[in-house]
Image (cartoon, rainbow, N blue to C red):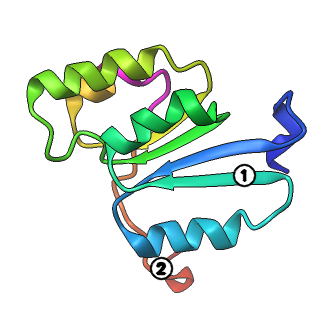
């Protein structure tokens, strides 16, 4: 399913999130011989892994949390060199404006299927 739009026979995904339960969930979702999932617990660690792993897709949750303005600008500059797909969750308007080509905005969180 994931590899349909990718040129490589194996999809390489990098998840950057500091929560172990999120990393565990993604490992269960992408448990497939066709997907190589790597995880990093911080933006700095993830950025160091991108050139080494050459992922097709990078998923980031609040990548600018705990970063100062200079570090955020360095993160933006580094990610703008990334040629794969980047999906991120952020409340940082500066980061969103610099990085996003498409924005999906939810104004309501559905907590269970009965809320739909």
x and y, in percent, of residue 5 in the image: 83, 32
x, y (%) of residue 54? 63, 30
| Residue position marked by numbered label 2 in the rendering | 115
Apparent side of residue 94 relative to residue 101 in the rendered image (left or right):
left
Marks 1 and 2 sit apart, C-alpha to C-alpha, by 34 Å
View extreme (bottom): residue = 114
Q: Which residue is mark 1?
A: 36
Residue drawn at (12%, 22%) of the image? 70
Horizontal side, residue 4 vs residue 18: left or right: right
Secondary element at image label 1: strand
Q: Is residue 104 above or below residue 110?
A: above
Assess disc 1: are there few (<14), some (14-19) or many (≥20) residues with their C-alpha within 10 Å of its C-alpha: some
**Quadrant hosting residue 113:** bottom right
Which residue is painted at 82% across and 32% down in the image?
6
User: Is residue 72 rendered to the left or right of residue 34?
Assistant: left
Residue placed furthest toward the front: 52
Residue at coordinates 85% horizontally, 51% vertically from top-left? 1
- Expressed as whole percent of the image width and height from the top left, the position of residue 24 reads 54, 73
Q: Is residue 49 magenta?
A: no
Could you say which is closer to the camera, residue 98 or residue 55?
55
Counting every numbered tag in the picture gives 2
Indicate the secondary structure of the residue bearing disc 2.
Answer: helix
Write the start and end of the magenta stretch as one range. Answer: 98-104
Q: Residues within 10 Å of mark 2 (few under 14, many from 20)?
A: few
| Image quadrant assignment for residue 26 | bottom right
Q: Earlier in the sequence, mark 1 or mark 2?
A: 1
Magenta part, dominant SS: loop
Q: Is 46 rendered above or below residue 82? A: below
Q: Provide residue 69's location: percent of width, then percent of height.
A: 10, 26
């Amino acid at each position: 399913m994931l590899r349909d739009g990718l040129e490589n026979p194996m999809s390489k995904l990098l998840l950057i999130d500091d929560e172990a339960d999120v990393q565990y969930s993604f490992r269960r979702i992408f448990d497939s011989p066709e997907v190589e999932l790597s995880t990093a617990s911080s933006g700095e660690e993830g950025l160091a892994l991108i050139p080494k792993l050459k992922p097709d897709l990078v998923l980031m949750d609040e990548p600018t949390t705990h970063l100062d303005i200079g570090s955020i600008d360095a993160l933006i500059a580094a990610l703008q060199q990334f040629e794969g797909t980047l999906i991120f969750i952020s409340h940082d308007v500066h980061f969103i404006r610099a990085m996003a080509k498409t924005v999906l905005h939810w104004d309501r969180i559905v907590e269970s299927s009965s809320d739909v």
